[in-house]
Image (cartoon, rainbow, N blue to C red):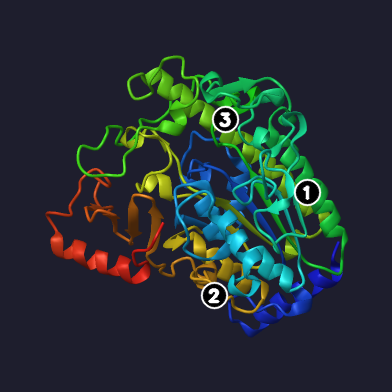
């Protein structure tokens, strides 16, 4: 345990209460908190704490009850690599999965010309930084044919240790799309899109990631003289949807709610044909035409959520057992959303709400009103300045997000607009509307105060309002090369 750090943290909170300010104190260097960042791949807000009563997610729900759940958090991009670039740099960035790899090449070529990443910033200020699993785009943070070459780091100058246990899957690339007991994806068309296999948590790769995270927590918490920044990245519920059979049991025979807005849009949109999903073996079935198959896909996604929730619970329990929990900031973040039939899409890669809205939960020791969620609109790039602020580090003025400290102190505090992008265009989410501006100039405008949500394009009917939102989008994120 870090008794000296914990004592300083508690003393600061006591002083704060005596002064009656009702807000979090600025930590001094000796009492800076640890950071535990939990990244979950393809996790939409399909959780009990987000109102999905049919989902079994007790451990994440418990985190939400202890911290601040952001009900309207939006990622910068509906794809893994670009979204993680934004989270790990605090910057709007390229749209593709190679965003961080490109940054790494620029950093090597011109170290002074590339600002530090978030873990690099914490590392520069005395933290031990460790990643386990899929935190950047490549699980384990290495590239090359097997995603395991030590001389090809995705994020140079960021991690003291970056780990990806591959086990029976042999390489990180094998584990990324692995199914039970070492099955790797050789030809996607021969790998089942979902699977439920009897066994313990380690028959799928995420069980090994959790085990390694526990080992790293033990090592980090034992060092009383140095704070840590530990990032743990789980792969599920990323395709293919595989989880131990025990996590499917809660969903057998359970009636699922109807899919909202299940039909394909008829006008201009960022709809696509669910190509990533359809690469897998589907038994010649189409979930848009076969309601039973659609339910089976949704149940297996839900089982993956419950599986990763159990692993999150193990990590949080170990943190608490270590004695470090009362001076550790915990962040749970989903890298983007995922369509489960909405707009007849099964996957991500759109600029609809379903691809861009993801869970964000922040647990800050001593925070006011724990368990009260916020409806403030925020975006992923806000995480870097927020964690720097809460840890008492210098402000990363190069980052483009803003600190969410005010919302953590008072959940009714307003948020701000959120910008997202993909190769087809850019989008602005306000408190009430979504604007989509395509690269060819075509526009979509949706009113989220109505039940129609993103099914009725108002851009032609409300040109003045559309123009106003276009101006806001252009001011926040002008057109740029992809």
> How packed is label 1: few (under 14 Cα within 10 Å), some, or many (20 or more)?
some
Label 2 or label 1, whichever comes before in sequence order? 1
- What is the CA distance from the residue labelled 2 to the residue labelled 1? 35 Å
Q: Report helix, strand or loop for mark 2.
A: loop
Q: Quadrant of residue 164?
A: top right
Is 182 left, or right, of 266 in this rendering? right
Residue 128 in view: yes
Which residue bears the numbered disc 2?
Answer: 398
Q: Residue 464: horizontal and vertical position, in percent? A: 15, 65
- What is the CA distance from the residue labelled 3 to the residue labelled 2? 40 Å
Which residue bears the numbered disc 3?
Answer: 303
- On screen, 60 above or below 399? above
Q: Residue 279: horizontal and vertical position, in percent? A: 47, 27
Residue found farthest to the front: 109
- At 36% from the left and 48% from the top, the residue drawn is 353
Q: Nearer the viewer, residue 137 or 150?
A: 150
Q: Quadrant of the C terminus?
A: bottom left
Mark sitting on residue 318: 1
Q: Report helix, strand or loop for mark 3.
A: helix
Residue 68 in view: no
Label 3 or label 2, whichever comes before in sequence order? 3
- On screen, 111 above or below 59? below
Q: Residue 130: horizontal and vertical position, in percent? A: 74, 56
Q: Nearer the viewer, mark 3 or mark 2?
A: 2
Q: Contact, CB < 8 Å: mark 3 with mark 2?
A: no
């Amino acid at each position: 345990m870090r008794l000296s750090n914990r004592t300083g943290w508690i003393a600061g909170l006591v002083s704060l209460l005596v002064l009656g300010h009702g807000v979090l104190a600025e930590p001094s260097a000796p009492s800076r908190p640890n950071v535990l960042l939990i990244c979950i791949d393809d996790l939409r807000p399909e959780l009990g704490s987000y109102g999905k009563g049919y989902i079994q997610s007790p451990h994440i729900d418990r985190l939400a009850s202890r911290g601040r759940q952001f009900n309207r958090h939006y990622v910068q991009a509906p794809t893994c690599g670009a979204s993680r670039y934004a989270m790990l740099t605090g910057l709007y960035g390229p749209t593709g999965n190679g965003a961080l790899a490109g940054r790494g090449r620029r950093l090597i070529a011109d170290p002074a010309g590339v600002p530090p990443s978030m873990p690099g910033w914490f590392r520069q200020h005395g933290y031990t930084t460790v990643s386990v699993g899929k935190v950047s785009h490549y699980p384990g943070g290495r590239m090359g044919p097997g995603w395991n070459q030590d001389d090809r780091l995705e994020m140079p100058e960021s991690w003291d240790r970056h780990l990806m246990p591959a086990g029976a899957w042999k390489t990180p690339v094998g584990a990324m799309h692995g199914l039970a007991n070492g099955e790797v994806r050789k030809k996607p068309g021969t790998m089942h899109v979902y699977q439920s296999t009897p066994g313990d948590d380690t028959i799928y790769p995420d069980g090994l990631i959790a085990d390694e995270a526990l080992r790293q927590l033990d090592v980090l918490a034992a060092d009383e003289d140095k704070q840590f920044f530990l990032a743990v990245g789980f792969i599920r519920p990323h395709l293919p949807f595989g989880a131990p059979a025990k996590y499917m049991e809660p969903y057998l025979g359970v009636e699922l709610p109807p899919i909202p807005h299940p039909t394909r849009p008829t006008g201009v949109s960022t709809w696509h044909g669910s190509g990533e999903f359809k690469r897998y073996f589907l038994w010649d079935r189409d979930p848009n035409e076969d309601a039973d198959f659609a339910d089976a896909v949704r149940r297996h996604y839900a089982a993956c959520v419950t599986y990763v929730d159990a692993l999150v619970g193990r990590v949080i329990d170990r943190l608490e057992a270590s004695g470090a929990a009362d001076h550790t900031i915990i962040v749970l973040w989903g890298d983007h959303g995922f369509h489960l039939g909405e707009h007849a899409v099964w996957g991500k890669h759109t600029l609809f709400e379903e691809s861009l809205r993801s869970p964000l939960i922040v647990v800050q020791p001593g925070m006011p009103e724990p368990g009260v969620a916020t409806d403030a609109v925020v975006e992923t790039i806000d995480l870097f300045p927020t964690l720097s602020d809460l840890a008492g580090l210098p402000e990363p003025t190069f980052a483009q997000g803003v600190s969410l400290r005010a919302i953590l102190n008072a959940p009714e505090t307003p948020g701000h607009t959120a910008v997202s992008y993909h190769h087809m265009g850019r989008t602005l989410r306000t408190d009430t509307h979504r604007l989509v501006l395509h690269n060819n100039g075509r526009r979509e405008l949706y009113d989220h105060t109505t039940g129609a949500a993103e099914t009725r394009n108002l851009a032609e009917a409300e040109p003045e309002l559309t123009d106003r939102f276009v101006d806001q989008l252009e001011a926040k994120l002008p057109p740029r090369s992809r």
